[in-house]
Image (cartoon, helix red, strand yellow):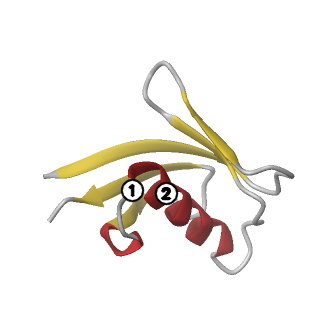
Amino acid sequence: MQKIISVAVKTGSKNENYEISGDGTIKIAIKERPVENKANEAVIRKIAEIFDEPKNKIKIKSGLKSKNKIIIIDDK
């Protein structure tokens, strides 16, 4: 079964953190800027940490070039 997660990303933050809003969206602040896919890699790392899943099970389904992303965690 897959988990589908809505994520809102703030890049270029001094402190990395996250919070889960009332509607279930995860708001993530990361240090990386959206250059050469570094921000997307940081988002995947952070989601892996939050859900205690390996990074290779996490994919960005939509929003590669947006601050709003849909993430899929594959439980297989």
Hey, which residue is sitting farthest bottom in the picture? 36
Q: Residue at x 50, y 51 (%)?
A: 69
69 relative to 56, above or below:
above
Q: In the rendered image of this protein, does residue 41 appear above or below residue 9?
A: below
Amino acid type, mark 2? Glu
Say left or right for 42 vs 47: right
Where residue 48 sits, quadrant-wise, is: bottom left
Number of numbered markers: 2
Badge 1 marks a residue whose secondary structure is: loop
Q: What residue occupies the far right of the structure in this picture?
A: 14
Label 2 vs label 1: CA separation?
5 Å
Identify the residue at horizontal 69%, vertical 81% (top origin). 36
- Corner quadrant of residue 12: bottom right
The percent coordinates of residue 62 (x first, y second) are 43, 57
Residue found farthest to the front: 52
Decide if residue 54 is on the left or right side of residue 9: left
Residue 44: % across, % down: 50, 64
Q: Residue at x 30, y 57 (%)?
A: 73
Q: Which residue is mark 2?
A: 49
Report the front residue among 46 and 25.
Answer: 46
Circle 1 packing at 10 Å, graded few (<14), some (14-19), many (20+), is few
The amino acid pointed to by label 1 is Asp
Rendering coords of residue 14 (x, y %) = 86, 52
Q: Nearer the viewer, residue 12 or 15?
A: 15
Label 2 SS: helix
| CB under 8 Å between discs 2 and 1 | yes
User: In this figure, which residue is indicated by the disc labeled 1?
Assistant: 52
Residue 16: horizontal and vertical position, in percent? 73, 51
Rendered-image quadrant of the C terminus: bottom left
